[in-house]
Image (spheres, grey):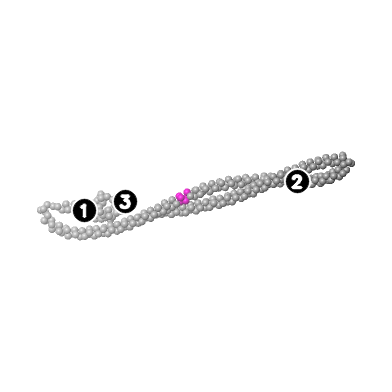
């Protein structure tokens, strides 16, 4: 369409005048070939018809002669008109051929226009589809970025929990050592309690024995006052020792109870630390699986995006 605007009436007139001067009959196809096959046949034919109309007016003006010569020329004109009829018939045939060429050219131009219109509609549809896909891909990218940010935060939290669990696990040997020491002390306290009980039993037996001896001594008070006094003093000393042993046993039992409580608390802390370590490991494994799944979904989302972009690019090139 833009090519037709480059053909001017001056170019058509100059080409037609040159062909006429060379003795060549100007036609639309001949002028188009002389101009380098540029311009449409419709435009060339329209401008050529204007040139021919100007040539006919010039010929009519040239035929104006004085009245005295007109009668003498009428016979000559009849002969010339008869001779020119054949030329006019040939001109008519050329015009009909040019009209047929113009019709063919117009049909070809219409086909081109229709094809270009269909291509434009197809390109518009492809453009709308590509814009929709681009919007969807942009939304998917934003969603993937948000998910990646949340996964990173979750991973950092899991790392923190794992570090805490590791610190607790690292402190487990020390707790176990303390537990072993508490157990040793508890065993010692138990042994001390057993020994104290044994000593208490011995002291009680001794007290009973001393009591019976005192009873015997009372019956023999007149004979063994000095010995009774010594035995009584010894009995009192043994009673004091027995009281001290009882106090020691009670203190040992209280200490054993405290150690039992500390041991139960240490076992509870150890079990809680193991449970937290196990939970942290499971959370870390789950987060690793979620991160791997997120990365796989990103790669899957990128691959269709490239193929779609490739198809959109191919359609635009067409």
Tag 3, which secondary structure?
loop
Q: Nearer the viewer, mark 1 or mark 3?
A: 3
Can you identify the residue that label 2 sits on? 193
By secondary structure, the bulk of the magenta-drawn segment is best described as helix
Visible residue check, residue 36: no
Which residue is found at the position 30% from the left and 53% from the top? 37
Can you identify the residue that label 3 sits on? 2
Magenta-colored stretch includes residue 252:
no
Can you identify the residue that label 1 sits on? 53
Residues at marks 2 and 3, CA–CA distance in whole angstroms = 118 Å
Badge 2: few (under 14), some or many (20 or more) residues near its Cα, within 10 Å?
many
Q: Nearer the viewer, mark 2 or mark 3?
A: 2
Residue 218 % position (x, y) = 86, 43
What number is the disc on residue 82? none
Tag 2, which secondary structure?
helix
Left or right position of 52 against 245: left
Sequence-first disc among 2 and 1: 1
Residues at marks 2 and 1, CA–CA distance in whole angstroms = 144 Å
Residue 167 % position (x, y) = 62, 45
Query: Within the image, what quadrant is residue 225 found in?
Result: top right
Magenta-colored stretch includes residue 140:
yes
Badge 3: few (under 14), some or many (20 or more) residues near its Cα, within 10 Å?
few
Badge 1: few (under 14), some or many (20 or more) residues near its Cα, within 10 Å?
few
Magenta stretch: give its range: 137-142
């Amino acid at each position: 369409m833009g090519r037709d605007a480059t053909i001017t009436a001056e170019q058509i007139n100059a080409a037609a005048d040159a062909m006429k001067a060379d003795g060549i009959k100007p036609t639309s196809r001949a002028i188009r070939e002389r101009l380098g096959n540029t311009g449409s046949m419709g435009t060339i034919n329209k401008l050529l018809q204007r040139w021919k109309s100007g040539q006919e007016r010039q010929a009519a003006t040239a035929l104006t002669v004085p009245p005295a010569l007109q009668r003498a020329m009428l016979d000559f004109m009849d002969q010339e008109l008869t001779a020119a009829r054949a030329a006019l018939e040939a001109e008519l045939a050329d015009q009909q051929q040019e009209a047929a060429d113009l019709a063919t050219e117009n049909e070809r131009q219409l086909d081109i226009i229709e094809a270009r219109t269909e291509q434009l509609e197809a390109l518009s549809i492809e453009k709308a589809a590509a814009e929709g896909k681009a919007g969807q891909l942009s939304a998917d990218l934003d969603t993937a970025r948000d998910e990646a940010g949340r996964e990173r935060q979750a991973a950092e939290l899991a790392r923190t929990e794992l570090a805490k669990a590791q610190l607790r696990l690292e402190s487990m040997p020390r707790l176990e050592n303390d537990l072993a020491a508490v157990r040793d002390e508890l065993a010692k306290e138990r042994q001390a309690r057993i020994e104290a009980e044994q000593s208490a039993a011995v002291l009680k037996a001794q007290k009973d024995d001393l009591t019976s001896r005192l009873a015997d001594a009372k019956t023999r008070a007149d004979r063994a006052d000095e010995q009774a006094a010594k035995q009584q003093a010894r009995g009192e000393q043994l009673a004091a020792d027995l009281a001290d042993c009882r106090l020691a046993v009670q203190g040992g039992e209280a200490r054993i109870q405290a150690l039992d409580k500390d041991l139960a608390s240490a076992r509870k802390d150890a079990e809680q630390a193991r449970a937290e370590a196990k939970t942290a490991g499971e959370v870390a494994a789950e987060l690793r699986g979620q991160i791997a799944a997120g990365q796989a979904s990103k790669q899957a989302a990128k691959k269709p995006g490239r193929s779609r972009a490739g198809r959109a690019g191919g359609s635009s090139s067409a």
